[in-house]
Image (tube, rainbow, N blue to C red):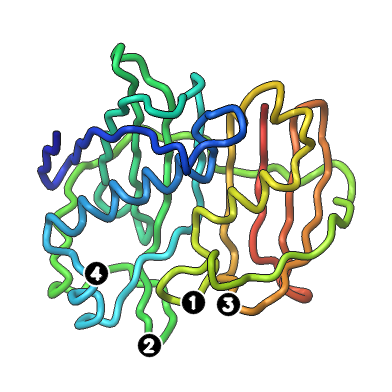
Amino acid sequence: MEHCTPDCYEVRRAVPECECDFALRLSMGGLLRLVQGASTRHCTLLGITEERYRETHTAFLLAKLCAQVYRVIPAGAELTLSTRPAAPAKAVYHRYTTLTLEDGQPAAAVDARWVLVDTETKRILRRAPEALGLPFTNPSVPELPVLIPKPGEEPLPLGEETVRYSRCDQNRHLNNTRYADLICDHLPLERLEAGPVRELTISYHREAPLGCTLGLYAWEEEPGRYYFLGKNGEQSCFEAAVKF
């Protein structure tokens, strides 16, 4: 099943085991990859392709996202993904995606905030080039909280992670969805065994290029609530908040 209009794209997908964790639950990274795939497919069907981006020397960069999980999503489950983009508010493009199980009840939602940049000047564009042909006209879409409060204490160092081949996208930067994998790899195992992450918020400050080393820091604000920080040298690459 696939349905596409400029305002909404719907598709049905079975949850692949390869995107699930040891409890055969859809992982947070797997959830974000399903959402990213649906969003990309929507743009492609509307003619917003890689060729169009190259011609206009533009690219969308993810600035912030919030993902909420309401129910456990098991391997093999049939999901309906419905993704809705909004017309830009200033320079920000909102896209809201819901994931619904076969009983019609919502299982998860993702609020993603994108910015359009000129790949030659690296500047954020407040107006898209006419040749890009963006047809998004929804005045608004639902929103989730994307603000990340600063931790009450200085976050503690966790170690380092190198951005390698298998984690990168076509721009040779750490893929947006791989931040979730990296964060979850550093959560207490007993928390993940007890149940999935219920909310993940990420603020992407700077791209992490292939080969760079990220210093990771974290702080447990309260039981089941964590703050993460990733730095490339002295520069912050991302912040994240996790709730169980």
Instruction: Identify the amino acid type marked 2.
Output: Glu
Q: Nearer the viewer, mark 4 or mark 2?
A: 2
For the residue carrying disc 3, how many other residues have a C-alpha within 10 Å: few (<14), some (14-19), or many (20+)?
some
Which residue is denoted by mark 4 in the rendering? 128
Vertical comparison of 120 with 233: above or below:
below
Q: Marks 1 and 4, how far apart in space?
A: 24 Å
Which residue is denoted by mark 1 in the rendering? 172
Residues at circles 1 and 4 in contact by the CB criterion of under 8 Å: no
Instruction: Identify the amino acid type marked 1.
Output: Arg
Seen in the image, is 114 located left or right of residue 48? right
Please report the residue visible at 37 percent of the width from the left and 50 percent of the height from the top. 36
Which residue is denoted by mark 3 in the rendering? 210
Number of numbered tags placed on the structure image: 4
Instruction: Identify the amino acid type marked 4.
Output: Ala
Seen in the image, is 198 located left or right of residue 158? left
Q: Marks 4 and 3, how far apart in space?
A: 28 Å
Instruction: Identify the amino acid type marked 3.
Output: Leu
Vertical comparison of 34 with 75: above or below:
below
Vertical comparison of 219 with 45: above or below:
above
SS for dot 3 = loop
Residues at circles 1 and 3 in contact by the CB criterion of under 8 Å: yes
Residue 235 sits in quarter? bottom right
* Residue 10 percent coordinates (x, y): 20, 36
For the residue carrying disc 2, how many other residues have a C-alpha within 10 Å: few (<14), some (14-19), or many (20+)?
few
Please report the residue visible at 50 percent of the width from the left and 58 percent of the height from the top. 176
Residues at circles 4 and 2 in contact by the CB criterion of under 8 Å: no
SS for dot 4 = loop
Q: Earlier in the sequence, mark 1 or mark 2?
A: 2
Q: Earlier in the sequence, mark 1 or mark 4?
A: 4
Q: Nearer the viewer, mark 2 or mark 3?
A: 3
